Image: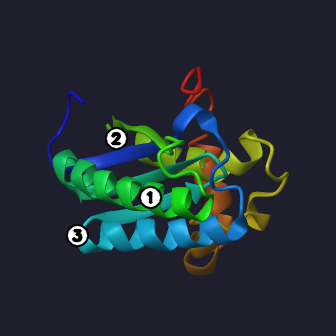
Amino acid sequence: HPYRDVGWYLITGTNFEHQPIMSLPERRDTFQAQLLTTFQEIGAKVDGWVILSNHYHLLSGEVELLVISNALKLLHGRTSRQWNIEDNLTGKRRVWYKFTDRAIRNEPHYFQALNYIHYNPIKHGYTTDPYTWKWSSLHEYFETQGRDWLRDIWKKHLPGNFGKGWDD
């Protein structure tokens, strides 16, 4: 984590060995609510997110990375315990791997990250239409900014190879 100051970050949290621990819709509902509440409590802005069955992405800013890291340690610990109890796997399963962060460099990079987040359910084969994926900030942008704005941002800031090699 070479850049740790107050800024904007693309945060990625992954279930250990990419296991689909969040495959149940109810689990994604709960985790999404907990994730957004956690970031609200630390005073971080969240401008984008997506929750999939084995990982999530979050575009967040206006706090130091250490504050984000400490909040995620608590959230990951709490959800690990909860899910292992629910699945009768206490002491038998590691739920989370480390989180990764990428400092956002500028406005084009910010929008490229946002588009990457919203495209992620398609990239990983969960859907062919991002508007049908419930666990994403895309719906909020659709309601507040409209489809034309989303299309314009998409055309100006294609994700391209953004994220290539991250899953290796």
Q: Quadrant of residue 47?
A: bottom left
Across and down, in percent, residue 118 comes to 62, 54
In the rendered image, the vertical position of residue 105 relative to residue 139, given as above or below: above
Q: Are marks 2 and 3 in contact (CB under 8 Å)?
A: no
Q: Which residue is found at the position 57% from the left and 20% from the top?
A: 165
In the rendered image, the vertical position of residue 6 relative to residue 168, given as above or below: below
Q: Quadrant location of the N terminus?
A: top left
Q: Nearer the viewer, mark 1 or mark 2?
A: 1
What is the residue that sits farthest to the right in this orientation?
A: 128
The type of residue carrying mark 1 is Arg
Q: Closer to the N terminus: mark 2 or mark 3?
A: 3
Q: Which residue is found at the position 79% from the left and 50% from the top?
A: 126
Please indicate whether residue 69 sits to the left or right of residue 120 in the image. left
| Residue 149 visible somewhere in the drawing | no
Observer-nearest of 155 and 64: 64
Q: Nearer the viewer, mark 3 or mark 1?
A: 1
Q: Residues within 10 Å of mark 2 (few under 14, many from 20)?
A: many
Across and down, in percent, residue 53 comes to 67, 51
Q: Quadrant of residue 145?
A: bottom right
Q: Secondary structure at mark 2?
A: loop
Q: Residues within 10 Å of mark 1 (few under 14, many from 20)?
A: some
Q: Quadrant of residue 136?
A: bottom right
Q: Quadrant location of the C terminus?
A: top right
Q: Which mark is residue 81?
A: 1
Q: Which residue is found at the position 79% from the left and 66% from the top?
A: 132
Measure the C-alpha gap from mark 2 to mark 3: 18 Å
Q: Which residue is mark 3?
A: 43
The type of residue carrying mark 3 is Gly
Q: Which residue is mark 2?
A: 104
Q: Nearer the viewer, mark 2 or mark 3?
A: 3
Please indicate whether residue 51 sits to the left or right of residue 130 in the image. left
The type of residue carrying mark 2 is Ile
